[in-house]
């Protein structure tokens, strides 16, 4: 199958220190700060994630950005979608993209996604413990779009039918998204950029026709919190066993979900009446950012991710009248356990799975277990990862190791 699919990976720029993070989290804070201090919370929990090829890199180094681009290109990634942080004229974490623009390197396609949430101490984007607040106005809309025009003019900037591609993470937070879109489009045309291709990310609120708010399309965010599968260890029996210390407390204190259930739920979502680009994730686990109440997807493997991505590619190929895009979350969300970049456990396996799915999506794959999350899965995990683990520890103790 000749797919001609453009795979775009979300890219987090928080891998260099900035004054704001120094003030709020301590001198020298980067995403690696949380990643390196993470520990496994229960038997079989894959943490910490340790980088392989690129090490604990700094995005201020042009060599790092070049290496990332070369690695992504080698495995079929079309470009990066950098998260963009704008707070009423104030930009943060902007240095990597600024230097990419100014230097002309790496020669690798990119676009932006405005992460228009509040910055909070809980990493939730909510309204509590706010560090940086979003305050919307149409005057700010105009200033914002003008600041983006040099990026939209760059020949590397990703376009759809000649239109610069710009994503907004949470359009539902905009007081009047239609008016914002109108201001952006009018100014882009006035300044010679031409029409824009505006995309809303379906992260928290789904099933909004983008056309009704002045946008062109939507993109699935993976995980889709409305289609993620059921929580595995959330019943009264397990809570009682936990109180008796017969079951790991961390399995009931955190939201633990089977990756197979997430992939199945998202693969089975009905096709909407509007343009929506599919989204896929290799894994997801934000325990590095949350000491309590983390969301942890277990049992993910490169083969399962490949099957899910191949399904997304096939769906895009069948929609002959829509742009051929698929989004991957993410290239380097290390503190959310979601990264294509090589780690010490899997190496290049997830990258190779990406290339496999993009080049041969029609191949039969049966890695994902599409059954419901039932009692068997819970008991199986409990025995394999907990009771068996206890026996191993006991054996080591008896053998004097």
Image (cartoon, rainbow, N blue to C red):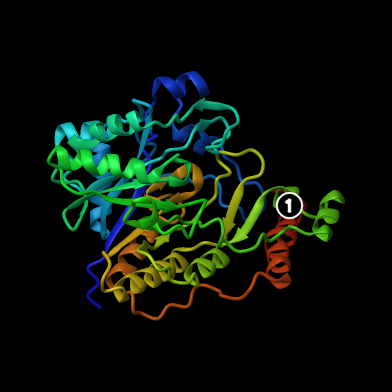
Q: Could you tell me if residue 113 is visible in this image? A: no
Q: Nearer the viewer, residue 93 or 243?
A: 93
Report the residue at 34% width, 47% height from top: 167
Q: Is residue 3 above or below residue 6?
A: below
Residue 358 coordinates in the image, percent (x, y): 30, 68
Image-based side of 103 in relation to 110, left or right: left
Report the residue at 46% width, 20% height from top: 22
Residue under pointer 1: 252
Mark 1 surroundings within 10 Å by alpha-carbon count, few (fewer than 14), some (14 through 19), many (20 or more): some
Residue 136 occupies which quadrant of the picture?
top left
What is the total number of numbered labels drawn onto the structure image?
1
For label 1, the SS is helix
Q: Quadrant of the N terminus?
A: bottom left
Q: Is residue 261 above or below residue 18?
A: below
Report the residue at 66% width, 44% height from top: 293
Q: Nearer the viewer, residue 10 or 62?
A: 10
Residue 345 coordinates in the image, percent (x, y): 46, 53
Residue 188 coordinates in the image, percent (x, y): 20, 41
Image-based side of 295 in relation to 378, left or right: left
Residue 210 occupies which quadrant of the picture?
bottom left
């Amino acid at each position: 199958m000749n797919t001609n699919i453009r795979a775009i990976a979300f890219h987090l720029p928080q891998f260099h220190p900035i004054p704001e993070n120094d003030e709020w989290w301590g001198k020298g804070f980067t995403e690696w700060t949380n990643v390196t201090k993470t520990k496994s919370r229960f038997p079989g929990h894959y943490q910490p994630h340790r980088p392989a090829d690129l090490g604990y890199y700094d995005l201020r180094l042009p060599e790092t950005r070049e290496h990332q681009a070369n690695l992504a290109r080698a495995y079929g990634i079309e470009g990066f979608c950098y998260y963009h942080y704008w707070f009423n004229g104030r930009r943060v974490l902007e240095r990597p993209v600024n230097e990419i623009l100014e230097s002309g390197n790496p020669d690798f396609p990119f676009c932006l996604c405005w992460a228009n949430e509040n910055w909070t101490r809980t990493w939730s984007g909510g309204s509590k413990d706010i560090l940086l607040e979003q305050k919307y106005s149409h005057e700010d809309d105009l200033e914002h779009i003008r600041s983006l025009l040099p990026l939209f003019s760059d020949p590397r900037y990703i376009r759809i039918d000649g239109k610069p591609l710009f994503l907004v993470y949470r359009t539902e937070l905009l007081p009047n998204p239609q008016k914002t879109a109108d201001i952006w489009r009018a100014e882009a045309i006035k300044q010679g950029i031409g029409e824009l291709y505006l995309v809303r990310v379906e992260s928290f609120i789904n099933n909004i026709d983008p056309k009704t708010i002045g946008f062109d399309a939507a993109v699935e965010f993976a995980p889709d919190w409305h289609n993620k599968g059921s929580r595995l260890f959330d019943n009264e029996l397990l809570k009682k066993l936990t109180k008796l210390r017969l079951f790991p407390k961390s399995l009931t204190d955190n939201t633990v979900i089977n990756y197979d259930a997430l992939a199945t739920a998202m693969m089975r979502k009905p096709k909407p009446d509007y343009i929506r680009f599919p989204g896929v994730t290799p894994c997801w686990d934000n325990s590095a950012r949350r000491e309590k109440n983390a969301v942890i997807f277990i049992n993910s493997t490169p083969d399962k991710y490949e099957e899910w991505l191949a399904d997304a590619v096939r769906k895009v190929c069948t929609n002959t009248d829509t742009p051929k895009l698929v989004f991957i979350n993410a290239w380097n969300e290390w503190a959310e356990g979601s990264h294509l970049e090589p780690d010490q456990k899997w190496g290049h396996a997830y990258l190779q799975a990406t290339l496999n799915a993009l080049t041969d999506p029609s191949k039969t794959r049966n890695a994902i277990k599409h059954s419901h999350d039932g009692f068997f899965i819970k008991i199986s995990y409990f025995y394999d990862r907990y009771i068996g683990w206890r026996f191993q520890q006991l054996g080591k103790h008896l053998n004097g190791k």
